[in-house]
Amino acid sequence: MTSYPHAPGFIAGDRPQIVTSRFQYDDSFTLERYLATGGYQGLKKALGRTPTDVHDEVKNATVLGRGGAGFPAGTKWGLTPQGKWPRYLVVNGDESEPGTYKDRLLMERDPHQLIEGCLIACYAAGLSQCFLYIRGEMAVAQERVATALNEAYAAGYVGKNIMGSRFSVDIVLHWGAGAYVVGEETALIESLEGNRGMPRLKPPYFPAAIGLYGQPTIVNNVETLANLPWLLVNGAEAYTAIGTKTSPGTRMVAVSGHVKRPGVYEIINGTTTFRDLLYGDEFCQGIRNDNQLKAFVPGGGSAPWFTPEQLDLPFEASQVGPAGSMLGSGAVMVMDHTTDIPRAALTLTRFYAHESCGKCTPCREGGTWLERILSRIVDGKGTDADLDQLLEVGESICPGAFPHASSSELGLSAVPFPYRMNTICFVGPSAYAPVHSALTLFRSEFEARVTKRTRIPVSGSVS
Amino acid sequence: MARLTEENVRLAREIIARYPRSRSATIPLLHLAQQQDGYVSNDAMVHIGELVGATSAEVFGTASFYEMFKFEPVGKYLVNICGTMSCALLGADELIHHAEHALDVKLGGTTDDGLITLERAECQAACTEAPCLQVNYRYRFRVTNESFDQLVDDLRAGRLDGEIPPHGTVARVRQRVAADRVVGAVAPADVADGPSWFDGKAAL
Ligand SMILES: Cc1cc2nc3c(=O)[nH]c(=O)nc-3n(C[C@H](O)[C@H](O)[C@H](O)COP(=O)(O)O)c2cc1C
Ligand code: SF4
Ligand code: FES
């Protein structure tokens, strides 16, 4: 079997590395390299302490979830109901939010770090079995994690009596088959039960209370768990010394689109700004061909867009939310002044419309409508009535004011995140977000594209 | 086509045993069937239903939700070109256009020789390497018209057989756990208490 070159994209810098420290090695995915670079030492430290103690360490570090919502992992682990057994861990490796590219790197290049993170979480929260769900289309990630698990089981790091201790837990490698919405945690659980991957109605189905097989279940993102080995070796104090109080540590961010040096960077959380990231020497080094920046998506395809006016915001949820968007899954997509804005919005809206699971009408119907109307506008066949119709369809998915950025040029003040929604999950609103941002911030581009039609023509008459 | 072979039934049982409930193995077994035949046949779905304790309609209900499962034969190579935003910003539409011409098929179609099926795919988590594509879920990055043509030549000449298995095989490494290392899955109803090691004391 041919050995694969490393997944490209990661760019190191002169910054602290919590989750990417082994990426410099060609054999970073092997047990041998892992052990030679401090691997499984965090687990060893954990097993020498009580589970409560380990849980407290994670709570004190405020490890924010990296899957999108940013909920602290330590707090989430504490939400399982007392006395209800068994409890499970489901690892979300379904990475498929447009623009997001980090979990695949972590799985391909340092699978043992993820495995060690899973074990620490199981130990701290009393979880008796772990299911590691990898996106179906990620063949190499599945191979690397399978190989690492096989090695780790054989060497006594997973399974019975881990590292000679009383701690025993299985990690089951599971894989999907292509459906974006399955990344939503309750859909992930449905899929893992062998069903169509449709999100569950909430409440009451918060997985920590009622999850896999109706049992308490912790769902955590790959990157979230990959933080734990370093945290256990170095302690919460060292962890919180990086970044800010509300956004400690680092986070992985993929920057793609029209920049000179697109890449995946491990950045300092809370302090790094979008300007640093897009223009900084150690990051993307500016817009391609020194073009003007037109807009950027700050947190994955679901996030409302920013313009150059928001460049100085840091990676800090408490500042990005009021400014009208979210940090989401660490994915920044950059558009320069040559970008055809309606067409760019269509590439995202088409994605979400296509990925709707069909469970709720506003998403199923609304997404398709948004895509159709937008396609027609992009093809030069739209009318000015279509612009209002886009907003009306959006209103049926998300009633009330939809979040957007401020614009001094347009005299707009920001509408803060989040929005209200008529759907079960965020797929429906996500189909609208790019349309709404594009239409709010770049309306003139739409107007230039459509035929004026002040009155809707009536064909024929009754009498 | 066929039910699962004897060897695959053995593999299927090994996979099923890892889960507290058999039906959780449905998607992995559908992949196994697709690996065997290149697509998921009706007979295979009936067989999977028998193995996991579901009706074949239930198995189909699950299978049809997921993009990767094909219910009719496709080309030996499935070429998925990403068309989502980051790739579109860097020329995915032009690449798709080129691919349609070069292969003389429309999106969704298969070449006359049955070798290549072309599809537009959604974000493949490689957005910094745009535009990108996957051939049977193996990546090609920063694809140009020229590198696309080269890829097609290589596929036709069989030069990539070592790297890219035929459609149906995704990962070529499976999880394998020795009997003396596995803790074992237990049906949730048979678990009354927390794990024995979760007793407030250190485990080591
Ligand atoms: C439509 C949708 C897709 C999602 N996709 C993913 C995903 O691919 N990976 C992920 O980790 N979280 C995804 N999430 C978030 C998960 O529901 C969940 O919040 C997360 O896995 C929890 O892990 P964390 O707390 O460690 O971030 C998605 C959410 C929604 C609504
Ligand atoms: S919002 Fe869309 S994807 Fe989410 S549950 Fe409703 S129909 Fe399904
Ligand atoms: S947009 Fe093409 S890989 Fe993400």
Image (cartoon, helix red, strand yellow):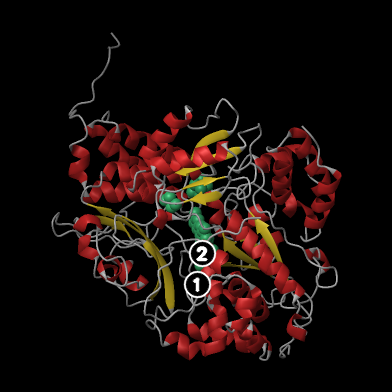
Amino acid found under the numbered disc labelled 1: Phe
- On whether ligand 3 comes within 8 Å of the CB at mark 2, the answer is no
Task: Please say if A28 is above or below B93.
Answer: below
Quadrant in which the N terminus of chain B appears: top right
Task: Please say if A293 is above or below B178.
Answer: above
Q: Is residue B180 visible?
A: yes
Element under disc 1: loop
Element under disc 2: helix
* Nearest to the observer: residue A271 or residue B91: B91
- Check the residue under mark 1 and report the chain it is in: A
Residue A447: image quadrant is: top left
The residue singled out by tag 1 in the image is A23
Task: State left or right for residue A96 relative to residue B3.
Answer: left
Residue shown at the point (24%, 66%) measured from the top left = A311
Residue shown at the point (61%, 82%) measured from the top left = A36
Amino acid found under the numbered disc labelled 2: Leu
Residue A214: image quadrant is: bottom right
Residue A312 % position (x, y): 24, 70
Mark 2, Cα crowd under 10 Å, few <14 / some 14-19 / many 20+, is many
Label 1 or label 2, whichever lies nearer to me, is 1
Q: Label 2 near label 1: C-beta < 8 Å?
A: yes
Quadrant in which the C terminus of chain B appears: bottom right
Mark 1, Cα crowd under 10 Å, few <14 / some 14-19 / many 20+, is many
Task: Please say if A267 is above or below A58.
Answer: above
Residue shown at the point (56%, 87%) measured from the top left = A233
